[in-house]
Image (cartoon, rainbow, N blue to C red):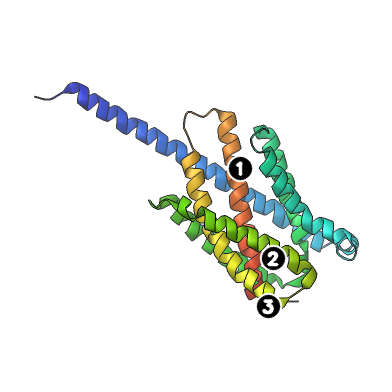
């Protein structure tokens, strides 16, 4: 004998699942839109500064360059410490400010490397990022088991990079670049999976907005680092 209540529950479950999937799709799209716009802001600022001698000469020919180079790291630390307490509007404002500061820091890329090699490297980085992020979104494997290894690798890359600012060792830079690319590829997959799993359709608009900004921030950092590290291999100097 057919149970009408069972059919109703199954229909309701399917409908709820469809609503959740649509909400998740919109959430991920919002994350990638924020990230993409952030990259546009960074690129425009970097290009504007690199095209204006009155801006880049005072910056990169004086100790001010250290402030510009280290400012993004300060933003990352501030973002991490204030993540839980800031509002969605504050998170957005800080994200756009961070993207602009990162553009200022990356202006030197346009002064050192040819436009063709920058475009080529960007395409390669985008392809690697897209494939890895797609894997993180679709895989059934729990990537948190890799988190400890990735965090340790990230800390090592950051420390080694700071040390090499003063040493200027080409061998160390090569090692940092190789290891760093693998670390940030792994972080891209893990962060994408984390962003997906953190989504909840019953979150209010404020919470969902914050999650989208923080997710975009994480993915943006991964992409920028992959791009910068790849430049050490594919970039052609002016």
Left or right of 110, for residue 195: left
Quarter-of-image position of residue 42 = bottom right
Residue 159 visible, this orientation = yes
> Label 3: which residue?
171
Residue 214 vertical placement versus 138 (above, below) = above
Q: Which numbered tag is attached to residue 160?
A: 2
Residue 35 vertical placement versus 186 (above, below) = above
Q: Position of residue 98 (x, y in %)?
A: 72, 48
Left or right of 163, for residue 137: left
> Label 1: which residue?
214
Residue at the spot 78% in from the left edge and 56% down from the top edge: 70
Among all residues in the image, which is located at the extreme left?
A: 1
SS type, badge 3: helix
Q: Which quadrant does the C terminus fall into?
A: bottom right
Residue at the spot 18% in from the left edge and 22% down from the top edge: 4
Whichever of labels 2 and 1 marks the residue nearer the N terminus, that label is 2
Tell me how far mark 3 sits from mark 1, CA to CA.
34 Å
CB of mark 3 within 8 Å of CB of mark 2?
Answer: no
Left or right of 12, for residue 238: right
Q: Position of residue 126 (x, y in %)?
A: 56, 61
Tell me how far mark 3 sits from mark 2, CA to CA.
12 Å
Tell me how far mark 2 sits from mark 1, CA to CA.
26 Å
Viewer-closest of 132 and 174: 174
Left or right of 96, for residue 204: left
Q: Residues within 10 Å of mark 1 (few under 14, many from 20)?
A: many
Quarter-of-image position of residue 236 = bottom right
SS type, badge 1: helix
Q: Position of residue 130 (x, y in %)?
A: 51, 58
Viewer-closest of 189 and 166: 166
Viewer-closest of 33 and 153: 153
Q: Position of residue 161 (x, y in %)?
A: 71, 65
Q: Which numbered tag is attached to residue 156?
A: none
């Amino acid at each position: 004998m057919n149970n009408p209540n069972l059919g109703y529950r199954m229909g309701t479950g399917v409908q709820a699942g469809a609503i959740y999937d649509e909400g998740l799709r919109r959430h991920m799209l919002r994350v990638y839109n924020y990230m993409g716009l952030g990259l546009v802001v960074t690129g425009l600022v970097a290009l504007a500064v690199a095209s204006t001698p009155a801006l880049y000469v005072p910056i990169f020919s004086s100790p001010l360059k250290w402030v510009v180079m280290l400012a993004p790291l300060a933003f990352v630390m501030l973002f991490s410490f204030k993540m839980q307490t800031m509002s969605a509007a504050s998170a957005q404002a800080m994200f756009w400010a961070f993207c602009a500061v990162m553009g200022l820091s990356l202006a030197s890329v346009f002064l050192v490397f040819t436009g063709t090699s920058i475009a080529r490297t960007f395409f390669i980085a985008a392809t690697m990022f897209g494939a890895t992020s797609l894997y993180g979104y679709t895989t059934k494997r729990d990537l948190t088991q890799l988190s400890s290894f990735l965090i340790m690798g990230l800390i090592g890359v950051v420390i080694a990079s700071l040390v090499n600012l003063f040493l200027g060792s080409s061998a160390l830079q090569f090692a940092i670049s190789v290891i760093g690319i693998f670390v940030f590829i792994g972080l891209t997959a893990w962060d994408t999976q984390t962003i997906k799993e953190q989504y909840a359709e019953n979150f209010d608009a404020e919470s969902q907005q914050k999650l989208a900004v923080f997710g975009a921030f994480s993915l943006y950092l991964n992409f920028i680092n992959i791009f910068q590290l790849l430049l050490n291999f594919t970039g052609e100097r002016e």
